[in-house]
Image: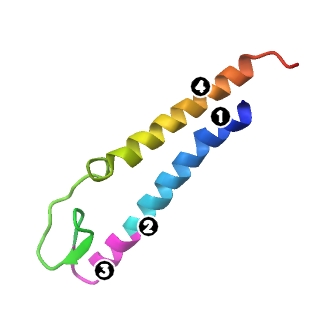
């Protein structure tokens, strides 16, 4: 149970960070070219665009990842409290 808990605790965080930095790479490339990133359409524009938080654009990914991490934490705690056989 501890192994499954650790997997659920850590894996969603790496997925969230990977997706976040993938998008950040596109945003930085757009800004370095002198453009403005449109977060809703994920395109580079010439006029300023409003910022839309990541949790508003992908709520299932963010909230689901955090819930899986909490579930992993609970499984780790249960695994540590069980006696070894």
Viewer-closest of 48 and 40: 40
> Residue 66, how many percent across, how many down?
46, 39
Query: Are there few (<14), some (14-19), or many (20+) residues within 10 Å of tag 2?
Result: few
Query: Are there few (<14), some (14-19), or many (20+) residues within 10 Å of tag 3?
Result: few
* Segment tinted magenta in the rendering: 25-36
* 22 vs 47: above or below: above
- The residue labelled by disc 3 is 32
- The residue labelled by disc 2 is 22
Drawn side of residue 43 relative to residue 67, left or right: left
Q: Residue at x 20, y 58 (%)?
A: 51
**Label 1 element class:** helix
**In magenta segment, residue 32:** yes
Q: Residue at x 45, y 60 (%)?
A: 19
Q: Earlier in the sequence, mark 4 or mark 1?
A: 1
Q: Earlier in the sequence, mark 4 or mark 3?
A: 3
* 15 vs 6: above or below: below
Q: CA distance from mark 4 to mark 1?
A: 7 Å
The nearer-to-camera label among 3 and 1 is 1
Q: Earlier in the sequence, mark 3 or mark 1?
A: 1
- The residue labelled by disc 4 is 74
The nearer-to-camera label among 2 and 3 is 2
**In magenta segment, residue 34:** yes
**Could you say which disc has been placed on residue 5 in the image?**
1
To which quarter of the image does residue 2 belong? top right
Of the 4 image quadrants, the one containing the C terminus is top right
**Label 2 element class:** helix
Drawn side of residue 63 relative to residue 18, left or right: left
Q: Residue at x 76, y 17 (%)?
A: 82
**Label 3 element class:** helix
Q: CA distance from mark 3 to mark 1?
A: 41 Å
Query: Are there few (<14), some (14-19), or many (20+) residues within 10 Å of tag 4?
Result: some
């Amino acid at each position: 149970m501890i192994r499954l808990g650790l997997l659920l605790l850590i894996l969603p965080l790496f997925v969230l960070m990977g997706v976040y930095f993938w998008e950040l790479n596109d945003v930085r490339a757009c800004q370095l070219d002198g453009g403005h990133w449109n977060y809703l359409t994920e395109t580079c524009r010439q006029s300023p665009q409003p910022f839309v938080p990541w949790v508003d654009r992908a709520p299932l990914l963010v909230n689901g990842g955090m819930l899986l991490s909490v579930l992993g934490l609970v499984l780790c705690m249960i695994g540590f409290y069980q006696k070894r056989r």
